[in-house]
Amino acid sequence: MSRIHEVATITSKGQITLPKPIRQALGVDAGGKVAFDFNGKAIMVTRAEPGEHTDPAIARFLAVLERDLAGGKNVTALPAALAKSLQQAKKRRVEISEEIAGDVSL
């Protein structure tokens, strides 16, 4: 494959638009997913296959969760109020890039 050099501008929210020649070369379109790998010197962008997730923190968390579920440890029902709140939130459309209004406590 021939070399493609394109420049993208970073928005104030840290977002970029992948230039069309890059999207075409990766075979991705609207809704497609790409993965970014940084080796300390360069970033490689690749098409992410469906279901692919390479975040090591998430992978470790899922492994701990799987062990807990298998062993029946640390697993309890959700409090009724939280379950109801989650069911209601499921019906609302969320724009992921929207700023969070108000105080947030974790």
Image (cartoon, rainbow, N blue to C red):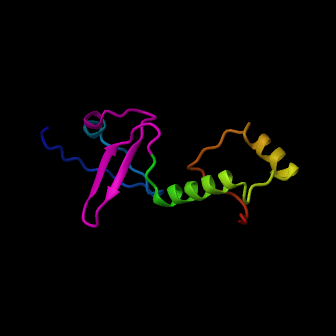
Q: What is the quadrant of residue 90 in the picture? A: top right
Q: Residue furthest front?
A: 71
Does the rendering let one see residue 78? yes
Place of residue 91 in the rendered image (x, y in percent of width and height, measured from the top left):
74, 36
* Vertical comparison of 106 with 92: above or below: below
Q: What is the span of residues highlighted in magenta in the rendered image?
A: 24-52
Residue drawn at the location 62% of the way across and 56% of the way down? 67
Does the rendering let one see residue 99? no
Left/right placement of residue 12 relative to residue 18 reads: right
Q: What is the quadrant of residue 64 in the picture? A: bottom right
Place of residue 45 in the rendered image (x, y in percent of width and height, measured from the top left):
31, 48
Left/right placement of residue 32 relative to residue 59 reads: left
Residue 25 falls inside the magenta stretch? yes
Left/right placement of residue 16 relative to residue 68 reads: left
Left/right placement of residue 58 relative to residue 29 reads: right
Q: Residue furthest left?
A: 2
Residue 34 falls inside the magenta stretch? yes
Place of residue 104 in the rendered image (x, y in percent of width and height, measured from the top left):
71, 63
Closest to the observer, 62 or 48: 62
* Vertical comparison of 61 with 88: above or below: below
Residue drawn at the location 27% of the way across and 40% of the way down? 22
* Vertical comparison of 76 with 40: above or below: above
Residue drawn at the location 81% of the way across and 47% of the way down? 83
